[in-house]
Amino acid sequence: MAPDSSAPLVVGAGPVGLTMANELARHGVRCRIIDHAAERSQTSRALAIFPRTLEAFETMGLADSFVALGLRLHGLSLHHGQEEVAQIDLTSVASPFPFALGLPQSETERLLGENLSSLGIQVERGVELTGLTQTSDAVRAILREQVRPHAEEIATHLSRQLREVSDDFLRREGKPETSDQ
């Protein structure tokens, strides 16, 4: 099935893109979400989720899943060498979540991606935006899909290699005797 060319396009399946796609879907708007990476990141580029983000996740029905996996951070201390230069108390924040939540970005992406999948939208991985043009009545996105060998081509290639190794072995060792009974 070809993607709907009139659907909003979300470029990037990091936390921001996944949140946007989830919010669109939650409000009844089907979208496409693409990411140039072939797989979800396994590394983290973020240290914590702050109270306002947790409040947004709560409106999406996701906060409990995040809080269950994360580590509540009630304060932060900033150091320069051995010297403490600042201390931030998060327990007084006017929020249902008076803490920062320590959770690797990879887990944030996993939870958001799973929720998006449950809403019927899959991240299109290995697809990148290479161009964008806009006229008075349309926007045209130019996408490029990474070339990935198909499983059948890989299996055929491996089968051919195995057959060549087998034929070479039989030439060197002699063919086994067979009997027609």
Image: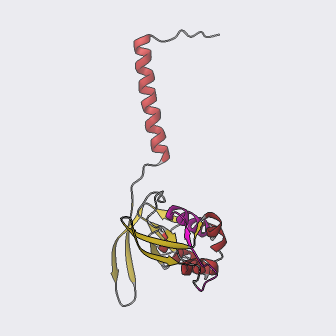
Quadrant hosting residue 61: bottom right
Whether residue 122 appears in this view of the structure is no
User: In front here: 166 or 15?
Assistant: 15
Question: What segment is highlighted magenta in the picture?
Answer: 94-116
Residue drawn at 63 percent across, 74 percent down: 63
Residue extending farthest to the front is: 83
Q: Quadrant of the C terminus?
A: top right
Quadrant hosting residue 144: bottom left
Q: Position of residue 93 (x, y in %)?
A: 57, 83
Residue extending farthest to the bottom is: 136
Q: Quadrant of the N terminus?
A: bottom right
Looking at the rendered structure, the number of numbered marks drawn on it comes to 0
Report the coloring of the rendering.
secondary structure
Q: Position of residue 6 (x, y in %)?
A: 48, 80
Residue drawn at 39 percent across, 89 percent down: 137
User: In front here: 121 or 20?
Assistant: 20
Question: Does the stretch in magenta take in 56?
Answer: no
Residue drawn at 34 percent across, 77 percent down: 132
